[in-house]
């Protein structure tokens, strides 16, 4: 099972903008280098573009530029590590170990610092490995400067794309979110069998994940008072209302009709068309219909506002806004710098693996031995997925990529033809990153081999495919042994801890639902579904690892499904409740909330659940309006199931 999960790829649309920018950004400096005969200098510019393009994630253009201001300078600092080559090698190893440890800590400060430290490790490794060849040709500060020129060229290409359609990222994410809502509505309209329940769970998970991405992109706290962000908040709140209404409805024909309407809205948003009006076959006073209509109205109002304020002050990316942001964040709080034991442990793993990888220079005598620590730096990124999975996929992908790269270097002579193939590979890289790490490694390997060949003097192709494969295998083995197998793994404890956080959020959600005039329900609902989504993602990562991690994850899936079903019951009750309905007894609600918080691995009371005479039956949450007693009975029943599942999962002592 875990082997199947290991090789699984993700569905991904072709990122047209990123592919075009990657092709232009990589091809232009290399073409200039070929024409001018200064390939070494243009190589560093090309690396600057490649690093920024490969590290680009979802976000508005403004957020991408702000992220670049952090990532690029940190990445450029790495090239000064070339100076360590002049030191005695044991001393250089000690300093490198310290720098790797610091990089591992900085890596935990956020996505921008994670990308920046990765680029710094890569730049430092390349500069140190090539130091004997380049230290007399170009100073390291010039290498760093050329790298920043590449980052600036990337920013220029990104800016040109933003001028063409500045709101494209937000619009595409919003269209994807509307489509996931349509898929959820369609899945909820299907019959109540096992396959339909599975499809409904997948659709709900897709909505939650897409909502989190959209939330991150639309809500920017630094500009929280702008008119656009007020409309963004309205869209997110309306979308949350549609989500809860879909879960609470049971009319299949109504759900399918709204699914079709949401699909039309998604298409219109994606292609900048006029939004479709309310379909004639839908009653505007229906709760689900009215909420979809409100969502459409919020989107339309945002479009009108953006059209009116396209040239207003709060829509510009001006220097004064940037200076204001930097000034507001000029003080670094000590609490932001303090890290926990898990971060220190991860940093120690990175430092150990990098030190061992650099030590391989004593035994590996080929010219490109530095590919060993380069592999370690690329793989040791636990926030991007399982280190075990990344190491194995790196080796597999490199092995396949070596075959492709060797065939290209044998069949295609050095020159424009080889450059054209390299540009084509670069254009495919953004899509490969979205698909799988193995595919990314498959395309990256021939790209690097061709890049080295083009920058090497002479007219004859030089094939380092064998070295690439051997060095990657050594680096991957170092990660597997010293970054994974020798360390005690506490998957069960981590899962239990994450589960307890989710149950605390669920308990708060239950309390909020049963309070009169509760105004925090949307934020409470978002929090509980986000925590459950994070827990499910954690399980998905473990399923790709060998036993016992995959076996533990398999045991936990029924528990997460039961917790998600419990959250759905609370959501359905909250959506169906009206001000004329009585609220459940506060004492009973609080007792149930306390019980949710106490249900955890290692502390599972099987008999302390309220209403012990209730017998749990595996059913989909009833979307008919339940009474307060029925609601409490349903919650109790689900809690009894959770208690039994956790009791079965907990190791006996």
Image (cartoon, grey):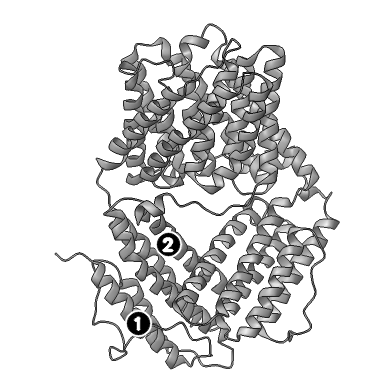
User: Does the image show residue 149?
Assistant: no
Is residue 39 rendered to the left or right of residue 270?
left
Sort mark 1 into few (<14), some (14-19) or many (20+) by Cα contacts within 10 Å.
few
Tell me the residue at 65%/47% (across/down).
15
- In the image, residue 503 sits, relative to residue 640, either above or below, namely above
Judged from this view, the residue extending furthest toward the left is 653
Q: Which residue is mark 2?
A: 536
Front-lying residue, 326 or 42: 42
User: Does the image show residue 390?
Assistant: yes
Q: Position of residue 311 (x, y in %)?
A: 84, 49
Tell me the residue at 55%/80% (across/down).
190
Dot 1: element: helix
Tell me the residue at 55%/20% (across/down).
452
Dot 2: element: helix
Front-lying residue, 554 or 101: 554
Is residue 8 rendered to the left or right of residue 320?
left
Choose top left, top right, bottom left or bottom right for residue 245. Answer: bottom right
Q: Position of residue 17 (x, y in %)?
A: 70, 43
Q: Quadrant of the C terminus?
A: bottom left
Q: Position of residue 600 (x, y in %)?
A: 30, 68
- In the image, residue 188 sits, relative to residue 9, either above or below, namely below
- In the image, residue 408 sits, relative to residue 92, either above or below, namely below
Judged from this view, the residue extending furthest toward the front is 411
Q: Which residue is mark 1?
A: 591
């Amino acid at each position: 099972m875990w082997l199947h999960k290991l090789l699984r790829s993700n569905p991904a649309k072709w990122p047209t903008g990123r592919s075009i920018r990657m092709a232009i950004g990589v091809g232009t400096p290399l073409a200039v280098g070929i024409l001018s005969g200064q390939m070494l200098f243009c190589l560093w510019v090309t690396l600057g573009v490649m690093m920024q393009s490969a590290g680009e994630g979802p976000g508005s253009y403004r957020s991408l530029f702000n992220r670049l201001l952090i990532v690029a300078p940190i990445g450029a600092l790495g090239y000064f590590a070339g100076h360590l080559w002049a030191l005695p090698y044991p001393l250089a190893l000690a300093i490198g170990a310290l720098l790797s440890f610091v990089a591992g800590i900085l890596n935990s400060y956020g996505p921008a610092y994670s990308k920046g430290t990765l680029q710094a490790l890569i730049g430092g490794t390349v500069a140190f490995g090539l130091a004997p060849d380049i230290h007399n040709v170009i100073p390291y500060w010039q290498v760093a400067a050329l790298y920043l020129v590449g980052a600036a060229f990337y920013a220029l290409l990104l800016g040109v794309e933003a001028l063409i359609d500045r709101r494209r990222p937000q619009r595409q994410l919003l269209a994807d979110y509307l489509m996931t809502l349509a898929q959820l509505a369609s899945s909820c309209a299907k019959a109540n069998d096992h396959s339909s329940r599975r499809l409904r769970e997948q659709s709900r998970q897709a909505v939650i994940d897409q909502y989190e991405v959209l939330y991150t992109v639309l809500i920017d706290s630094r500009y929280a008072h702008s008119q656009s962000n007020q409309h963004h908040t309205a869209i997110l709140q309306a979308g949350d209302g549609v989500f809860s209404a879909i879960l609470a409805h049971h009319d299949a024909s109504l759900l399918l009709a709204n699914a079709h309407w949401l699909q039309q809205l998604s298409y219109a948003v994606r292609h900048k068309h006029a939004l479709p009006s309310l379909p004639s076959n839908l009653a505007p006073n229906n709760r689900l219909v009215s909420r979809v209509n409100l969502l459409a109205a919020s989107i339309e109002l945002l479009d009108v506002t953006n059209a009116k304020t396209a040239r207003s002050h709060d829509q510009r990316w001006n220097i004064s806004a940037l200076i204001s942001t930097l000034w507001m964040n000029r003080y670094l709080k000590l609490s932001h710098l303090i890290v926990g034991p898990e971060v220190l442990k991860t940093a120690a793993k990175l430092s150990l693996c990098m030190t061992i990888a650099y030590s391989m220079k004593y035994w590996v005598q080929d010219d490109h031995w530095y590919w060993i620590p380069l592999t370690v730096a690329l793989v040791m990124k636990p926030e991007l997925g399982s280190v075990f999975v990344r190491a194995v996929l790196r080796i597999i992908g490199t092995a396949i990529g070596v075959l492709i790269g060797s065939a290209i270097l044998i069949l295609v002579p050095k020159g424009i033809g080889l450059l054209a193939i390299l540009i084509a590979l670069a254009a495919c890289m953004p899509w490969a990153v979205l698909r799988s790490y193995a595919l990314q490694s498959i395309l990256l390997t021939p790209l690097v081999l061709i890049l080295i060949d083009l920058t090497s003097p002479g007219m004859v192709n030089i094939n380092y495919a064998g070295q690439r494969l051997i060095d990657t295998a050594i680096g991957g083995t170092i990660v597997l042994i010293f970054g994974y197998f020798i360390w005690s793994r506490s998957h069960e404890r981590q899962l239990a801890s994450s589960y307890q956080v989710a149950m605390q959020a669920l308990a708060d959600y239950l309390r909020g639902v049963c309070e009169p005039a509760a105004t925090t329900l949307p934020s409470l609902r978002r929090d509980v579904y986000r925590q459950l989504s994070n827990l499910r993602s954690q399980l998905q990562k473990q399923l790709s690892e060998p036993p016992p991690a995959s076996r533990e994850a398999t045991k936990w899936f029924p528990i997460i499904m039961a917790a998600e079903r419990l959250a759905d019951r609370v959501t359905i009750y909250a959506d169906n409740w009206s001000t004329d309905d009585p609220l459940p007894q506060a004492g009973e609600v609080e007792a149930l909330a306390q019980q949710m918080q106490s249900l955890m691995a290692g502390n599972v009371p099987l008999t302390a659940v309220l209403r012990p005479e209730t017998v749990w039956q595996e059913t989909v949450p009833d979307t008919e309006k339940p009474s307060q007693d029925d609601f409490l009975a349903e919650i109790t029943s689900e809690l009894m199931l959770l208690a039994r599942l956790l009791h079965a999962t907990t190791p006996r002592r």
